[in-house]
Image (cartoon, helix red, strand yellow):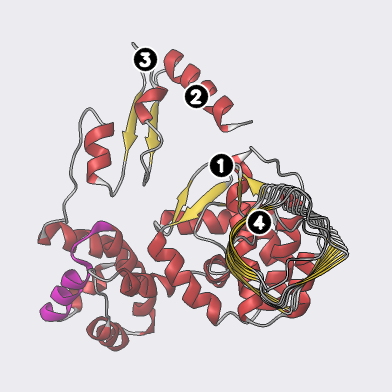
Amino acid sequence: MSDEDLIRLLRSVLATKRILLILDNVAGRDFEPSSLLSNGSPSKILLTTADRDLAAVAANTAVDLQPLNEEAARVLLRRVAGDELLTLPGEVLDRLLRLTGRLPQLLVIVGREARLVKRRGQEVLERWASNLKIDTGDLQSIYEFIWHQLSESEHRVVAVLGALAETRFNDALIAAMLQSSLEDTREWLSGLESRSLLQRISSSDFQAHSSVHRFAVDQWANFEERDQVLADATNYLVSFLSNASDTDSRYEPYALHLESLFEWYIRESDWASVRLLLNSGLRFIRVSGRMSILAKTNWFLAQWNGLNAANAILSDSLLRGLQANDCNFAEATLVKLKCEGTQFNDCNFAGVSLVDIDLRGTQFNDCNFAGASLVDLDLRGTQFNDCNFASARLASVDLRDAQFNDCNLTGIYVVQADLRGAKFAHSPWIEYVFVNVHLDETPPPDAP
């Protein structure tokens, strides 16, 4: 059932039944809770959120929950941990209240930990309470404290989140990464949600808060099962995204996850995985009309075969040692690229926009640039063999010592270009336009 169908069903039920719907730990303002209630509905919605502004806007009545008073905090802590806490020295118990800021969630967490520690004896309990460190003004400190309350399985869930992008994910992805059952995975995710480490987006989708994701990245750096987890995550995402369409935004978070994994492979110089991903048949995926996967990264010693990057956007990248074969860049926009030792064979650049690109020494064989727009390019020493430039527009290009062999230059428009030292073998200029072009003393061969 889609989210839209679920909302319609829920709205219908709330309109005909008397129900109290509880929305816990709501974040983000894209969803309007009151839209679930029709006029005259007997149902009510109770919403909890850390966002005071959201509460003020979304609710008819908002109650700002403050820290507990000292007596209430002591009662809550004692109920969770047991009466043994009363035997602690007064200054130690006061210290626990200060550390938690008398916040209910932290009091419960500290109480649970104290209940476990007290089994090892009163002396151990007192030493633990005296040395406990929590900084309520530092989320990292709170997460480090909560980390010790998690199970080993929950530790693994948090750690693998550090390999993913900071966006939503589903339970099936985490299950694939950890090779666990969906039932177990959902239990772990629900446990993390109950500790406010994750936000539930739907029945199967979750998202880590930004500060939690940063904490997860640190845990991922020390995770011992990285290689297997990365391989399983890549296989899942490639399979999942094989059904992606150009307009379905549901796939976008998973495209970003795959991009995050690819960047990890690059940083770790895992060239085998880089090649595997590039040759997966997926490569460039356009989501919501823009490039999403592998759009801003560096490509080293890679090979593209049959890549379809039509209408793609590729920017701020270094293409080193790249060989592209039979690739389609029609109507694509390539900006601020630097190519080193790169070769393009039988590639289609028709209608492409190339802007601010360093292509020195690059080789193009049997490539089509018909109608392309080439602006602010460094093409010194570049070699074009059997290429078609019909009606292409070149502006602010440096073509010194470039070579054009058996190329079609019919209708080419060149403005503010330097062609000194360029060689044109069997590449006639027909119906061309030159504006502010620097040439050698002799015009190009076959020029009128």
Q: Are marks 3 and 1 in contact (CB under 8 Å)?
A: no
| Nearer mark to the viewer, of 1 and 4 | 4
Above or below, comparing residue 87 to residue 281 in the picture: below
What residue is pinned by disc 2?
10
> Who's the residue at 22% across and 85% down the image?
130
Q: Say whether residue 103 is magenta.
A: yes
| Label whose residue precedes the other's in the sequence (3 or 1) | 3
Above or below, comparing residue 309 to residue 122 in the picture: above
Q: Is residue 280 left or right of residue 146?
A: right
358 or 213: nearer the viewer = 358
Q: Which mark is residue 357?
A: none
Q: State whether residue 296 appears in this view.
A: no
The quadrant in which residue 340 appears is bottom right
| Label whose residue precedes the other's in the sequence (3 or 2) | 2
Above or below, comparing residue 38 to residue 89 in the picture: above
Q: Which mark is residue 173?
A: 4
> Who's the residue at 74% across and 57% down the image?
238
Percent of width and height locating residue 19: 40, 24
What residue is pinned by disc 3?
41
Q: Amino acid at mark 4?
A: Leu
What residue is pinned by disc 1?
203
Helix, strand or loop at disc 4? Answer: helix
| Label whose residue precedes the other's in the sequence (2 or 4) | 2
| Label whose residue precedes the other's in the sequence (1 or 2) | 2
Q: Which residues are magenta?
A: 90-104
Q: Amino acid at mark 1?
A: Ser
